[in-house]
Image (spheres, grey):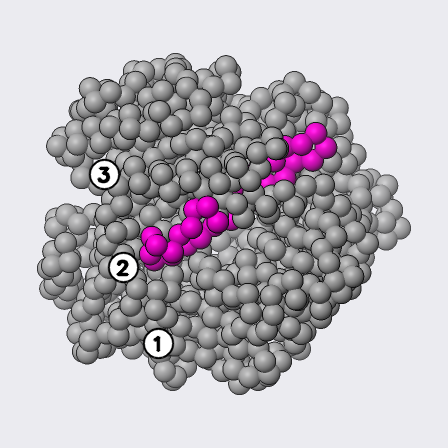
Amino acid sequence: MEDLAEIAIQAALNAGASFADIRIEETHKTKLEISDDVSKTSLGQLKGAGIRAFVDGAWAFAQSTELTPASMKRTGQQVALTARAIRGRVAEKFDMSGPAFQDAVSLNVKQKLQDVPLEEKMSLVRMVDNEARAVDSRIVNTRTTYSDITTQLFISNSLGTRVWMANSLPRLLLKITAKENGVQQRSWGQMFGRGGFEIIDETGARETGREAAKLAIDLLASKAAKGGTYDVIADPRLNAAMVHEAFGHPCEADNWVAQTTVLAGMLGKQVGPEFLNLSDDPTIPSWRGSFEYDWEGTKTRKRRLVKEGILTDLLHSLETAARMGMDPNGAARCQSFMFQPIPRMSNTLMERGEWKVDEMIADMRDGILLCDYNYGYTDSAKGQFMFQANYGYVIERGEKTQMIRDVSLAGQILEFLDKIDAIGNDFQMSAGTCGKANQLVPDNSGGPHARIRQVPVGGM
Amino acid sequence: MEQEFFDLGAQIIRDAEKHGADQVEAYLMSRKRMIVQVEKGAVKTAEEKLDVGCAIRAIVDKKLGFSYASTRDSEDIQALTKEAVTLANVSLPDAALKGFPEHNDSYLDPGGLYDPELSQMPMEAAIELVLRAVDACRAALRTRKVLIGAGLTVDSTLTVITNSRGIDGAYQETLIDLSTDPTIKEATSQASSFEFQISRNLSAIDSEWIGETAAEKTANLLNPKTIQGGKLPVIFTPMAVEWLFGLGFAQAINAEEIQMKRSYLSDSLHQPIAPQHFQISDDALLPGGNQSRPFDAEGYPSQKTEIIAKGVLEHYLHNSYTAYKAQVDNTGNASRTPSRGSIGSPYQNTPTIAPSNLVIAPGKGTLEDLIAETGKGILCRCTFDRPNLSTGDFSALVMEGFLVDEGEIQHPLKNTLIGINMRDFFLGVTSIGADTRRLHRVISPSIVIKSARISSG
């Protein structure tokens, strides 16, 4: 591997690149799904190299699945020549710089995913699916999916970085559909982490399935929310997703150098209340969004994005750090060797506040408690975001009352943070898969309950 | 490479049968992709990628296994073949699994899928094409402070499918997608928008139109306002219809979702669900259609299928498995790219069900006519939301939209949400325009619905 990487980088430099890097990857994926006693199973392997060359602000990228010296040399030359060909058309000339790292990181797991027989994984899926289905006769469909990804990755660049990394990500995901008197509802539950098969423990898996099934049954009695403007309390899962979408993405520094974020010019300035602290931290062991080095081979560290309401840090690749005169902080990620690394989140968190959740609800008097997360998205340039909670409760006179479902809420990033007036003292994480620029990467988001005043909420 | 793929397919079938497979299918793909990205009005990145991969499905005793790899190496594929059979052995037996489709005839060619000029387009020409769109956009916004992004993707793909029941199919296709996305920064407002064209043919791409239209749309979005909420008519332009139908409706008529009872349309076959004048078909044989192909992802021949005719839901979308299970004809909708923006190459996805080209029959009038007829309402040009599959509830942010009053556009919208159940949406269709656009997966004019809940604040 290291020899192949050296051939590609030297070929790119010899052909006129001023910087070159390579990711050589071997990834194995397993997916075992059961729904209504029908299984869907797949095993996948991605193996190859992604090579980049840079000159005078111009980037070129190519991939090869032929891991041979001849292919590495040819691809290295090709990307360098392409970069040279477009160098005269760039908007801004700059140089690539940054620290070099040499390391070989191994991941300590109790039970290696590849050592667990497929039969054992399948047996777990079947058991969880059966038990979730058995919770109530009104459950008309269950879909239980176990998936895992194991990766060996070697990253090398012309600055001298040589890093070996490993990843191991198991996940169990359930989707439940319940039906009664023509009313149909769905729910979901999941287990996740970074490590071995021990993360999907049998007891926890069973409980996850049963809880998801019970939620689907509860949702049968829910009503569609009535649209309007409300005071809202977001539960930890929804709050985490909002932090990720509404604030994490605008802090990705590629939006800054392209000047397509509404946060531009706000570094060092107050963007929210003084009790607001947001961070992105890939260094937490066993969390799904953790990694020791990013996909450019830069050592990672915790990023304090907002400290006491002030925007203090961004998520950087080598390029964005160089262009903005800041230190690289190891936030460049890519889906696989087939893509270029770009600034991405890892484990994105709102830190705990001081409010007890019950007191926050009682203090609000009237509004909506929104729970869990279906999906959401952000337009960083417009500053507009949208989320959909899976379910919620109407709050009347400080009490939880009618259950509601599929509640959408929208906002403007800069207005939204100012509307947060209470943060809970609880905390919960939620696994996700984040999409950006046609690339998906695994991540985590987390936080406490948070209250936001006067939010537009969509309803039927 | 086509013959090499057929040879590998034959090898896969032989090896899998030796390992004990009753039936085998090999899917091989080679895709040459060129990407140009523009940042701040100038080229940022150029990519040229060759993605070659293989996927295998094997059936053993009515149990199905699937494996894939980014390779065409013969030894790697031998290991992959063994994995597919191993996986089949640990899967659950399925009485409804008849097997892979059969077809021993030639395929109908939709025509217009492959443009040799596009396939051989040099990088320099690709860059020129993008920069023409950027220049047109810049010229249209010359009095404003503007940042222009743009992107071009050109694909040239060879697909081969062969199975142990006689399927042997191959076709080549090209696709170009050019977009421009300007951001205008003013002292009191910042706005961004986009415009694009997607086609099988280079000659259909008009860089100047893309750049100028993106500029105009962005300028129109400056200084958005919230509005008084309530029940109002909504005009969905073709781009908004694509998100609503290409993702949401497509999933709701997927026979797998129907059979698993996960769709709100599970009990609606042959029922009237829309006005008589509302018609949708799925046409995989549409000449030059962006999703047209001679056969589906299992090698089953392509066809045109009426989905909603005279307001009645006539067909769900099937692959070979769901068709056999429901004892109906296969509609040839097996797909390895289930939705726009699907991540990963087609060979990395288990075959599922998706529409080809969803065609909504046009009515009468331009968008301006529809706006004038609507009087007071909302114009939704773009939303990134989709309905709840189980309930049909659709709660969506208007990413780009306008207040319409007195038959004219008044101002762009901010923080505005639309809420409606999809059953009410269909029944509430009052007008369909003739302003048809070919988008990624949907070919549609603008659609007007009578009333939806509007929240804004």
Contact? badges 2 and 1 (CB < 8 Å): no
Q: Residues within 10 Å of mark 3 (few under 14, many from 20)?
A: many
Q: Residue at x 74, y 62 (%)?
A: B407
Q: Amino acid at mark 2?
A: Tyr
Q: Where in the figure is residue B290, as x and y percent of width and height?
A: 38, 61
Q: Residue at x 73, y 36 (%)?
A: A415
Instruction: In this rendered view, identify the residue nearer to me: B64 or A159.
Output: A159
**Disc 1: which residue:** B303
Q: Amino acid at mark 1?
A: Gln
Q: Where in the figure is residue B139, as x and y percent of width and height?
A: 52, 37
Q: Is residue A64 magenta?
A: no
Q: Amino acid at mark 3?
A: Ser
- Residue A411 left/right relative to B158: right
Q: Chain of mark 1?
A: B
**Disc 3: which residue:** A64
Real-space Cα distance between discs 2 and 3?
Answer: 25 Å
Real-space Cα distance between discs 2 and 1?
Answer: 19 Å
Q: Chain of mark 3?
A: A
Q: Where on the picture, by quarter, is residue A425?
A: top right
Residues in magenta, as a range = B180-209
**Disc 2: which residue:** B114
Label located before the other in sequence (2 or 1): 2
